[in-house]
Image: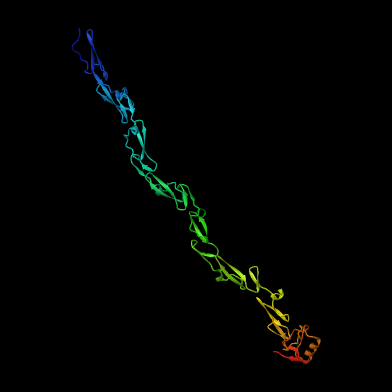
Amino acid sequence: MQERNHNCSEYANCTNNVGSYNCTCRDGFQGDGLSCKDLDECKLGIDKCSQFAQCTNQVGTYDCACHHGFRGNGRTCKDVDECRAGIHNCSLNAFCANNVGAFNCTCREGYEGNGWICTDVNECQRGTHSCHTHASCHNFQGSHRCYCDRGYRGDGQTCHDIDECQNGNNRCILNSRCINTPGSYSCQCLDGYYGNGEVCYDINECSRWPCDRNAACTNTDGSYSCSCNDGFRAYGQSCVDYDECKAGVHDCHEKATCINTSGSYRCSCFKGYRGNGKVCKGESGCACARLRREVCSPVEFFLCYVLSYCFCDDNGQDGDANLRRKSDTRLDFTKFI
């Protein structure tokens, strides 16, 4: 006989038996069938939710909901790549790195922050740049640039000095020398010139008289020359007197003595002669007649001596008188002053 009335729990199933019935709690409940209490599958860990899902207990059952960053029915949950899908909130100046169920934001090089907010790092101001010692640093968003200083060439991180003297890119003139310096150059006037190197003027060395006192100084372009005065000869850097008497290059009379002087010489007639040394005559003031000959005869020499009109030398060529023979064969001495 089937019992029509039973006292099974409302959360139980009633199963009729011969002369009786059984009460069995439904899935999601536990008890003796007469009393059935909800079974918390989530708490007991007997749910079938994905490890990436949230289990929520319900009366007699439970729900599975995929965690944030996953998608699926709760029992099966797959990671969502927010970076690829473009659903992240990283800064434009940050890298997005996908993780299981999440993502990370990392500021790019040249920026700093938490990844969601990234601000530019001024490497030039902080001194964290890679510019060369002879380069200037210019900051840009997220980076910086290096420019070699004037007088240098390179990529800014490596700078080499430009030799303006060698490449001719200088303002030095012909009368100056170009001296290369780190990052620049200088112009130096050559010896014999003065100025700033870009403009050079000739130095008149003769104004300071660098020559020997017995020499003449001649200024030249960038230099000078010294030439010994007449009567002097060069001896090293000096001018020494040239002894014309000793060298026999004077023009003194044969009856005169050559006396050397500084830079010159003078002539002095022998005793018994008068004149300027270059011309010397007997002091008596008369001369022996030449009688149309170049020398005096012994008779003429005797007559001159006795009459004391003149003194003939061995050649009969001295004196300033003229003795000539008249037609009456008499000798006539005429004195000329």
Residue 283 lies left or right of residue 97; in this view the side is right
Q: The C terminus lies in which quarter of the figure? A: bottom right
Residue 138 lies left or right of residue 304; in this view the side is left
User: What is the number of callouts on the image?
Assistant: 0
Residue 34 visible at all: no
Residue 121 lies left or right of residue 256; in this view the side is left
Q: Nearer the viewer, residue 282 or 231?
A: 282
Render colour scheme: rainbow
Q: Nearer the viewer, residue 178 or 79?
A: 178
Q: Residue at x 79, y 88 (%)?
A: 300
Q: Residue at x 56, y 70 (%)?
A: 206
In the orientation shown, which residue stands out farthest toward the left? 4
- Percent across and percent down for residue 191 are 55, 63
Vertical order, 74 against 254 (above or below): above
Q: Nearer the viewer, residue 223 or 334?
A: 334
- Percent across and percent down for residue 43 are 30, 25
Vertical order, 112 against 318 (above or below): above
Q: Residue at x 64, y 70 (%)?
A: 238
Vertical order, 122 against 47 (above or below): below
- Percent across and percent down for residue 17 are 23, 9
Residue 239 visible at all: yes
- Percent across and percent down for residue 279 are 69, 82
Place residue 98 in its image quadrant.
Answer: top left
In the orientation shown, which residue stands out farthest toward the right? 298
Q: The N terminus lies in which quarter of the figure? A: top left
Vertical order, 297 against 32 (above or below): below
Residue 311 lies left or right of residue 198; in this view the side is right
Q: Nearer the viewer, residue 256 or 164?
A: 256
